[in-house]
Image (cartoon, grey):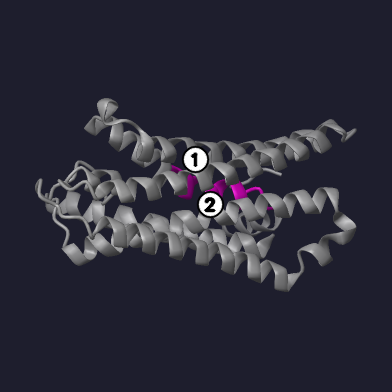
Amino acid sequence: MYFFLLNLSILDLGTISTTVPKSMDNYLRNTRVISYRGCVLQLFFFVFLTEAEFSLLTTMSYDRYVAIFRPLHYDTLLGSRVCVHLAAAAWACGALTALLHTANTFSLPLCQGNAVDQFFREIPQILKLSCSTSYLREVGLIVVSAFFVFICFVFIVVSYVQIFRAVLSIPSQQGRHKAFATCLPQLAVVSLFVTTGIFAYLKPPSISAPSLDLVVSVLYSVVPPAMNPLIYSLRNQELKATLNKLIPGWFQK
């Protein structure tokens, strides 16, 4: 669990660092400028980190499922070597997806200006600048990626449903409350990430508006990475004890 949480924290930090600092810098400088190389790198790392994070969240749901339903076989099914391989697969999946999207997006001729109505360089906004029918190739790749994300989301939901069924069999009301208080926020953040992300990339142009695009992009690119540390870490008893030593009275026993 802690190994996967370490990977998740690195991905969350990277996702926030890819979009927010540059946006804040532009706001303070009262400008909207980014270099072409910076635009390419921002898009690549954003897709890389978000895809890797969702793959890792899928792996973490499987980890919880095995821990609850196959506890005696946990070390066999999810030993240290298997965990390393699963984490490496998540990072590799993100890198491959990002490479394909970046190469496809920036191979398009952009003939409708160079300004996007977004606080970071998002693929749908860049596609609006293209005047070539070749953008359909990238749209097809987005649909395939969205289908993969949807399949992973179904797997996560099924895993959590099974976990909730096991939780309901716990005789202790306090135990059920603790389990639901931990699992429900995790599922809520994953659902927010998937629904807003798919909507941002697959919504029809007819319902596109700058204010709506901005809100949706913040919901899937900023909120989940900011909420994950609170959900996954602040319920950890060891972390609470450490914070209580650093800031007395911050957490009430």
Looking at the picture, how far across and down is residue 189, in whole percent?
Answer: 54, 40
Q: Secondary structure at mark 1?
A: helix
- Between 175 and 6, the residue placed more toward the observer is 6
| Residue 248 in sight | no
Looking at the picture, how far across and down is residue 224, in whole percent?
Answer: 48, 45
Looking at the picture, how far across and down is residue 53, in whole percent?
Answer: 52, 55
Which part of the image, by quadrant, shows the N terminus?
bottom right
88 w.r.t. 46: above or below: below
40 w.r.t. 176: above or below: below
Q: Earlier in the sequence, mark 1 or mark 2?
A: 2
Q: Residues within 10 Å of mark 2 (few under 14, many from 20)?
A: many
- Between 95 and 57, the residue placed more toward the observer is 95
Is residue 231 highlighted in magenta? yes
Q: Which residues are magenta?
A: 223-236
Q: Residue furthest bottom?
A: 81
Q: Residues within 10 Å of mark 1 (few under 14, many from 20)?
A: some
Q: Is residue 172 left or right of residue 121?
A: right
Real-space CA distance between mark 1 and mark 2, rounded to the nearest whole angstrom: 9 Å
What residue does disc 2 label? 54
70 w.r.t. 80: above or below: above
Is residue 176 highlighted in magenta? no
Q: Quadrant of residue 196?
A: top left
Q: Quadrant of residue 71?
A: bottom right
Q: Secondary structure at mark 2?
A: helix
At x 83% / y 66%, what residue is drawn?
76
Looking at the rendered structure, the kind of residue marked 1 is: Val
- Between 174 and 249, the residue placed more toward the observer is 174
What residue does disc 1 label? 194
